Amino acid sequence: MSSAFKSGTALLLTLGIGAGAVAPIVISAPAFAQTTFSDVSSNDWASTFIQELASRGVIKGFPDGTFRPNDPVTRAQFAAMTSQAFTAQATRSGTNFVDVPSNYWAFQAIQRAYTTGFLAGYPGNVFRPNENIPRAQVLVSLANGLTYASTAPVETTLQLFTDASDIPGYARGSIAAATERRIVVNYPDVQLLNPNRAATRAEVAAFIFQALVSTGQVAAVQSPYIVGQASTPQPQAIRIPAGTVIPLRYDKADRILLAKNEPNPLPIALTVAQNIVTSDGTVLIAAGTQVSGQLVVAQGGAQFRASELILANGQRIAIDATSEAITQTETVRKGTNTGTILKGAALGSAAAAGVAAVTGDRNIKATEVLIGTGAGALAGLIFGGDRIDLISIRPNTDLSLKLNSELVLPRP
């Protein structure tokens, strides 16, 4: 949980509806409500859900104008969302979770989510407030909190999902009920539920909006990703299997030098080096597609962990892929000319501090510092001795990605 969310300075997702859980109400748009966000394009799959809630003052983004649709949502954050979105009556007494002290920022929201039936705890009376909430739990929460039950055979309803076998036993009835009420929204493949993956902010916004639609509190919108929506085309998705290798390149430097004590994580954007194609030549991922992620230094090595593909149309697709761990080192000794070291290289901030300390050159420019704390913090990183061993990465050959799980892309 970030301190920004705790303080309210950077509100993750504010849902401010004053309404009964099932009684229809009218929500008027507040003056000057922000309805667009710099990282949610008009053709983003979730833009309609986000904009509809934002126009009613139900959701807000961050002070920098972003919404961060692909960020995960914790159980505590989701409790806060449900307590703001629905004013259901308590159905049971509160409880004191051992990992939620009374001064915890979301204590009251968690109590309310528990007493109204939206959320429960785990054995041992723990709540796990900082645990990312899976999509299955979100749907179970909404179905339970709104007291929805399946009217059709559960297994028949769940046949809509190609991965129905992945739905946990405890969640099957509730997810079937949520599906009947058209609360389930699946992107990019409407038939793929991904029940055990952490829910994103965009997905939670879509689920909550659809829950409000189901109670008559807001008008329905059209989306091809709402499961069971009448006359909805079923878009085919591109599936790239786990184990696929994606070559990358880094255009800013020929090599990256990192100290073994670099501040983690180190954000960086790389580029797909060549088209990823099928056997018949169909392009799945185009060369030049941006891949954002982080370099992580641990146990004397570095690894690139990708988090998003940024497509040409601006769509951001979550990706679970990593490079091999890079352990190759390069030694910088006292008296080495920094011009030789820096030629064609980008440095992490701790690496830059180490080079400055060993060589005595305190004039490493900010443009030569790749990532991390930045040149202004170099003085705070103390190194000694007459040499430093740096992790040396050749990004155009060392950072090829391997998919850890299937990647699903929308078909153009």
Image: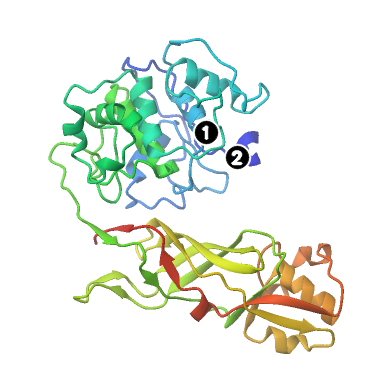
Q: Which mark is residue 177?
A: none
Q: Which mark is residue 77?
A: 1
Above or below — where is 156 with respect to 336? above
Can the viewer see residue 51?
no
Q: Looking at the image, do the residues carrying marks 2 and 1 touch, with CB atoms under 8 Å apart? A: yes
In the rendered image, residue 266, in percent from the top left (x then y), is placed at 61, 62
Above or below — where is 130 with respect to 342? above
Q: Is residue 324 left or right of residue 227?
A: right
Q: Nearer the viewer, residue 132 or 9?
A: 132
User: What is the distance, in whole Å, between disc 2 and disc 1 at their CAs?
Assistant: 9 Å
Where disc 1 sits, the SS reads helix
**Splitting the image into 4 quarters, where does residue 200 fall?**
top left
Q: Quadrant of the C terminus?
A: bottom left
Q: For the residue marked with disc 2, what is the amino acid?
A: Met
Question: Residue at image x 38%, y 71%?
Answer: 245
Can the viewer see residue 209?
yes
Q: How is the image coloured?
A: rainbow
Question: Residue at image x 51%, y 18%?
Answer: 112
Q: Earlier in the sequence, mark 2 or mark 1?
A: 2
Where disc 2 sits, the SS reads loop
Q: Which residue is mark 2?
A: 1
Question: Residue at image x 45%, y 29%?
Answer: 30
Q: For the residue marked with disc 1, what is the amino acid?
A: Gln
